[in-house]
Image (cartoon, helix red, strand yellow):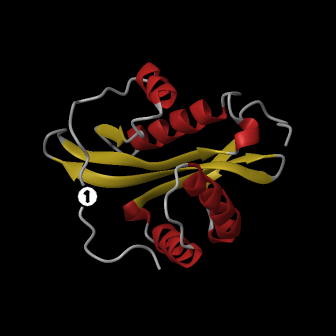
Amino acid sequence: MTPSNPFGAHREARNEDIPALLQLMRLFYAEDNYPFSETGASRALAEFLENPAYGVLLVAVVDDSIAGYVAVTFGFSFEYGGRDAFIDEIYVDAALRGRGYGEAQLQRAIAVCKSRGVQAVHLEVEPRKERTAQFYRRHGFSDHNRILMTRRLRSGPS
């Protein structure tokens, strides 16, 4: 893919984007050895897109193809003074990395959060991905010496 626009076009995802998003999600999950269920991911994407209160899913379009995405989910935090957001996933096609697409996606996600009254944006980085952590630090994110912990209430995606 060669970009016609230096950072591609960004727009909110639509239902017809689900097949392309599933392809990118499969690649993203494989990079980090996360389990991936196409059925579960497809169902989650459809539910997310039907419920704007959950958040926003932005896609980066390069040469008429979806080349990346960022999923932002909304919540509420007393600690941060109100509505907060979590960048649940951000992914750029491997062939386009290092060209500013990830930065453009991050900036677009932050702009959407600001426009929707979000007080704080959170994300997580795998401990082994120090280069990625440095990228986020350069964009104003900071570590806060906490451990993200999760308890599944239902079994994984199906």
**Residue 96, percent across and down?**
74, 37
* Residue 8 appears in the rendering: no
Please give left or right for residue 53 compared with residue 64 in the image. left
Q: Is 143 on the left or on the right of 95, as rendered?
A: left
Question: Residue 22 in the image: x percent, y percent?
Answer: 63, 65
- Give coordinates of residue 137: x percent, y percent: 41, 23
- Point 44% across, 29% down: residue: 133
Instruction: Assign a secondary structure to mark 1.
Output: loop
Residue 142 versus residue 34 in the image, above or below:
above
Instruction: Choose top left, top right, bottom left or bottom right for residue 124.
Output: top left
- What is the three-letter code of the residue carrying label 1? Thr
Q: Is residue 37 above or below residue 71?
A: below
In the rendered view, does 16 fall on the left or right side of 32? right
Looking at the figure, which quarter contains the N terminus? top right
Q: Is residue 137 above or below residue 154?
A: above
Task: Please name whichever residue, 99 or 16, is drawn nearer the observer in this view of the structure.
Answer: 99
Query: How many numbered circles does the render carry?
Result: 1
Residue at the extreme top? 138
Q: Residue at x 23, y 30 (%)?
A: 144
Q: Nearer the viewer, residue 46 or 113?
A: 46
Observer-nearest residue: 67 or 146? 146
Q: Residue at x 66, y 34 (%)?
A: 101
Q: Which residue sits at x=55%, y=56%? A: 29
Few, some or many C-alpha atoms within 10 Å of disc 1 (few <14, some 14-19, many ≥20)? few
Q: Along the line of sight, which residue is nearer the eye, 129 or 88? A: 129
Seen in the image, is 150 located left or right of residue 134? left
Mark yes or no: residue 19 visible. yes
Residue at image mark 1: 150
User: In which image quadrant can residue 17 be found?
Assistant: bottom right
The quarter holding residue 123 reads top left
Q: Position of residue 146 (x, y in %)?
A: 20, 37
